[in-house]
Image: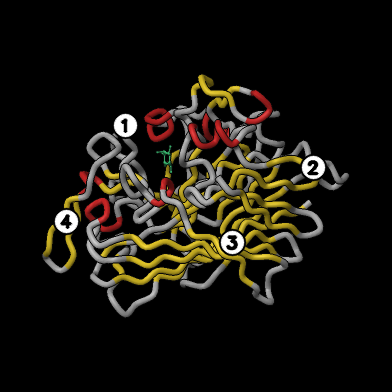
Amino acid sequence: MRAYTLKNKNIEVTFIERGGQIISIKVPDAKGNIADVVVGYDTMDETLAGDGYFGALCGRYANRIVGGKFEIDGEKFQLDCNNDTNHLHGGVEGFNSRNWTVTPVSLDKFVQAYKLSLTSADGEQKYPGKLEVSVIYGLTEDDQFVIEYEAETTKPTVINLTSHAYFNLCGAGHASAVNHKLQLNASRYTPICAKLGTASGEIVPVKGTPFDFTSAKTVKSACDTDHEQINMIQGIDHNFVIDNYNGSTQLVGTLLDPVSGRKMEVYTNQPGIQIYTGAHFDGSEKGKNGAPIEACAGIAMETQIFPNSPNYANFPNATLKPGEKYKHTCIYKFCK
Ligand code: GAL
């Protein structure tokens, strides 16, 4: 499996063809100490055999579609279900398990960039329309790792692409991310209604709940709160509704490791961000540094449309029609 590395004077991002999976991001702290800030494995063999969502590109529809069902203009579709009775992250063979075609590209705004592309056939995982997808991974001079997604379809379909890295700014495999401070420009979130984490369709204020990250606070303080939404999945696995969403790329959140001082800002043009604290990691698998991967080994910050949007009229529209272009930007900016 071929690995590709993007480098500027501070940061190094390495990814592979399978799933466009980001297998390491090496970032210095203010003293110049380098840490690899994404959860993963020490070897390629473990990476290929391990959790296929770590750092991967997810699609055609990232997150859950309840029952794998949706309708477009009265036509009903039934996707394969791979998460009990739901469709998750594009199905059994989502984009995370596909081999992407990788080519170097030269773009003025990036020190270095690669284009990853794939074709998703009409009917793949039972989605309608042939989809041409391209993703740019670019690194800027000022330490922004930029992901630019584009897609076009031959038939009306649904789309929600995301990147599924779990960040640990202490260095993956060295300490838990539970004491990271998280801040989100989100005064509302979408609650879940069952153990499987499917969105209920409501949009509710975060005020007075553990989901209030409008001011920075530790992830632990939220996860330790006795609240039914936290207890249901032993942590956070929720979509937050970005304030003042207008389709342009804006700062939506910040993650900070108070010990090293490493900080990551997240920018996107998407209406939502799924925060996942990795409750299902039970320590049975060894990751980087030989350390068991436990809950809160890292925190996923997945920019996206909302979960199950195709079935809720009050959620943003996830339909892509022929002649339209899906455009999604996500930026992870590393600061000291
Ligand atoms: C997250 C999702 C979690 C879990 C994980 C994949 O995006 O919110 O519930 O399914 O992906 O392991």
Q: Position of residue 157 (x, y in %)?
A: 26, 65
> Residue farthest to the front?
1
Q: Is the CB of mark 1 within 8 Å of ligand 1?
A: no
Task: Name which residue lies at 64% across and 29% down.
Answer: 176
Which mark's residue is nearer the viewer, 2 or 3? 3
Which mark's residue is nearer the viewer, 1 or 4? 4
State whether residue 146 is above or below residue 184.
Answer: below
* Distance from Cα at disc 2 to Cα at disc 3: 21 Å
State the residue position of label 3.
137
State whether residue 290 is above or below residue 137.
Answer: above
Q: Secondary structure at mark 1?
A: loop
State the residue position of label 1.
195
* Distance from Cα at disc 3 to Cα at disc 1: 34 Å
Task: Compare residues 116 and 210 and report the one nearer the observer.
Answer: 116
Q: Position of residue 69 (x, y in %)?
A: 19, 51
Q: Secondary structure at mark 2?
A: strand
Task: Name which residue lies at 26% across and 34% down.
Answer: 84
Q: Are marks 2 and 1 in contact (CB under 8 Å)?
A: no
Task: Name which residue lies at 86% across and 46% down.
Answer: 32
- 34 displayed left or right of 96: right
Q: Secondary structure at mark 4?
A: strand
* Distance from Cα at disc 1 to Cα at disc 4: 24 Å
State the residue position of label 4.
77
